[in-house]
Image (cartoon, rainbow, N blue to C red):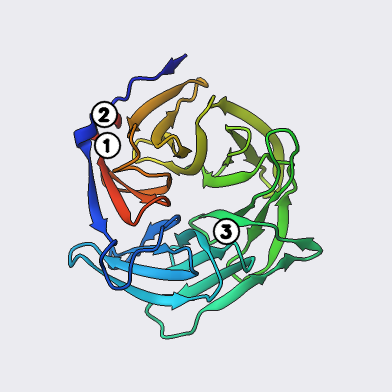
Amino acid sequence: METSTPLLPASNARVIFDGFRTTPVLDHPEGLDLDPVDGSLWCGGEAGQLFRIDLAANSIELIHQNPGGFILGLRFTAAREVIWLDAVRRQVLRLAVGTGRPFEVLVDGAIGDHQLVYPNALDVTDDGLIYVSDSEGDDQTGGGAIYRLTADGSAEAWCPGPFHFANGVAVSPDGQWLYVSESASRAVCRVAILPDGSAGVIERRWRLGDRVPDGLVFGPDGRLYTACYYPSVILRLEWDGSVTTVYEDPIGHLLSNPTNMVFVGTDALVANLGRWHITSIDMRAALT
């Protein structure tokens, strides 16, 4: 069963930060997360930029740039370390915010004998484990993998797949599952995190028709949400296997190829890869 009429009206969304005419320009953000100390919003850009946005001051600053890079996934750890992925340079990078230490390259091109193809998205657990999706495969042929990094920087191929272009990842609040969006097959699957930390089998739970899932995030209600790159829609993935349409922008203006989102209370902040702004959606009516 599927709910196709959006739960939320168009008026529930607004542009919370417009980076079209700022200096620097917010260059097509994909990954985003909040600094756990000062609440600033951090995101990446398509020319390898790492941005910090002060939403209260409506300002943006360039923290770092990887020339020739393209930043996709980005998350903070509980220790105030921002981790981000460069898909072009095939790197996983880390910056300990507020320490004055330079950024580190945790992974550069390969993890053991595994060459990275397209490091795309990540999630971080409370104890500092980092799960990274490597995107490969189409709707017929699988590929890619999920890698796991520890807080000390060691890395391993955690789940070899195959996936159909593994994209967004989200660890369940109870720490027992890793959810993975498969953009090419337009599905969302889950992998059990076994008691010894190893990966279980891949279970495909939701088929999304013509919607292309990108980022995954758990809301304050404990339910799983995905931002779809195409069309511009936010979905809730129900535990019975059904799908609820939460918000949709049929003209791709306020939401434009949305990728990742993060909750601030009952508002969802959404990155728009197709434009230069961050969208805020009032989700209260969907969280009941």
**Which numbered marker is on residue 95?**
none
The amino acid type found where label 2 is placed reads Leu
Image quadrant for the C terminus? top left
* Coordinates of residue 229 in the picture (x, y in percent): 47, 41
CA gap, disc 1 to disc 2? 8 Å
The amino acid type found where label 3 is placed reads Ile
Residue 84 position (above or below residue 15): below
Taking the spot 52% from the left edge, 21% from the top edge, the residue there is 241
* Coordinates of residue 45 in the picture (x, y in percent): 44, 64
**Which numbered marker is on residue 283?**
1
Q: Secondary structure at mark 2?
A: loop
Of the numbered discs 1 and 2, the one sitting upstream in the chain is 2
What residue would you read off at disc 2? 8
Taking the spot 67% from the left edge, 39% from the top edge, the residue there is 164
Q: Secondary structure at mark 1?
A: loop
At label 3, counting other C-alpha atoms closer than 10 Å, the crowd grade (few under 14, some 14-19, many 20 or more) is many
Tell me whether the residue at label 1 lies in contact with that at label 2, contact meaning CB atoms closer than 8 angstroms: yes
Residue 171 appears left or right of 112: left
**Which numbered marker is on residue 130?**
3
Q: Secondary structure at mark 3?
A: strand
Taking the spot 64% from the left edge, 65% from the top edge, the residue there is 90
At label 1, counting other C-alpha atoms closer than 10 Å, the crowd grade (few under 14, some 14-19, many 20 or more) is many
Of residue 211 and residue 8, the one placed in the foreground of this image is: 211
